[in-house]
Structures are given as structure tokens and as C-alpha cells.
Amino acid sequence: MKIDTILIASDHAGFEMKEQIKEYLRAKFDFQIIDLGANDAKTSVDYPDFAHSLAKKIDDKTYGVLICGTGIGISIAANRHEGVRAALCHNVDTAILAREHNDANVIAFGARVIDLDLAKEMLKAFFTTQFAGGRHENRVKKIETKG
Ligand code: RB5
């Protein structure tokens, strides 16, 4: 995992958590952190717009953080993009396993489901855990095939 940039996006439901997480990521990591919106918590917006905007920019060195109310809608939309493996995580274990087993390049979570401290712990785990490779390599490759 060679990260240059972390993109972060949310809808209105995830806005407040996004703002706090942005500060945390900037303080904790040397990566470039780019905020793709939303820009406030009051204007109701559509989570797929932010998921697509972020997912289009994911590449080998560009990872992502997506936040909506539950993390569900925004991760579903992001996963429509080839090469994007967005993992909806609920705790530190799922954040670690998303990297080790699934080589996830986007972490998603719900601002109405988890608290800020847990979100920070999950981000620390996600961005410091390497893909385990081995038996997981072929499984991850198979994700991109249509069966
Ligand atoms: C917005 O109210 C909410 O539906 C959205 O943030 C998300 O939870 C959708 O999956």
C-alpha cells in the first residue's frame, strides 16, 4: 500500500464527522488529504453524487474515506466503479480485515452508527494495515470478474 492521497467525502449526514476526521487524518498522516464535499450539514444532498465523485479518482496511490448516515448507500454507489473496493466497516476488526483480506482502497462508515473516537481508531487501523496477499490475492482478482 503506497498512499499519496486520501480523498474524503460525505453527504450532509456525514458532514460533521468528515470535518473532524479531516483534521485527525491531517495530524496523523503525511498523505495529502483532499475534501470533495459535502460542504455543510444543512443542505440535503444525494450521497451517490459524492460516492461517484470520489470513486472516479481512486487509483494505486489514491485511497478514500466515505461517510453517510449509515455508510450503506455511499459504499454501494462507490462499489459500482471498477477497481474500487469500498468496505463498510463498523469496528476496528472489520477495518483491519478489509485491508488484510479484501485489499480495500476505500473505507466507508456511518456517522449515525459509530462515534468519532471509533471512527478514528478504524482509520488508524485501515491506513496502517497491509494487504495479506497469498490466498486472498486470487479472491480479490475475482471481484472484478462478472462470473
Ligand atoms: C440521508 O438521510 C441517509 O439516507 C444517508 O446518509 C445514508 O444513510 C444512506 O445510505
Image: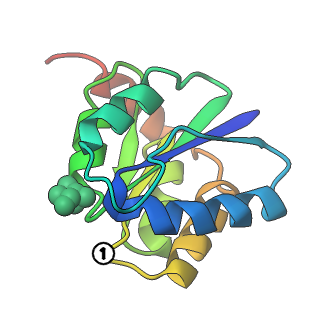
Tell me what residue is drawn at x 70 percent, y 57 percent: 128
Q: Residue furthest front?
A: 42
- Measuring from the top left, give residue 136's x and y in whole percent: 44, 40
- Measuring from the top left, give residue 10's x and y in whole percent: 41, 50
Residue nearest the observer in this picture, 71 or 136:
71
Q: Where is 142 relative to 20, above or below?
A: above
Tell me what residue is drawn at x 76 percent, y 33 percent: 4
Where does label 1 land, which residue? Answer: 112
- Measuring from the top left, give residue 114's x and y in whole percent: 38, 78
Q: Amino acid at mark 1?
A: Arg
Quarter of the rendering containing residue 56: top left
Residue nearest the observer in this picture, 52 or 80:
52
Classify 10 Å Cα crowding around label 1: few (below 14), some (14-19), many (20 and above). some
Quarter of the rendering containing residue 31: top right
Labels in figure, total: 1
Tell me what residue is drawn at x 43 percent, y 75 percent: 91
Tell me what residue is drawn at x 82 percent, y 63 percent: 27
- Measuring from the top left, give residue 86's x and y in whole percent: 38, 42
The reply, left or right, for residue 114 in relation to residue 70 is: right
The reply, left or right, for residue 123 in relation to residue 104 is: right
Does residue 1 appear anywhere in the picture?
no
Q: Quadrant of ligand 1?
A: bottom left
Q: How is the image coloured?
A: rainbow
Residue nearest the observer in this picture, 41 or 55:
41
The reply, left or right, for residue 2 in relation to residue 53 is: right
Mark 1 within 8 Å of ligand 1, using the beta carbon:
yes
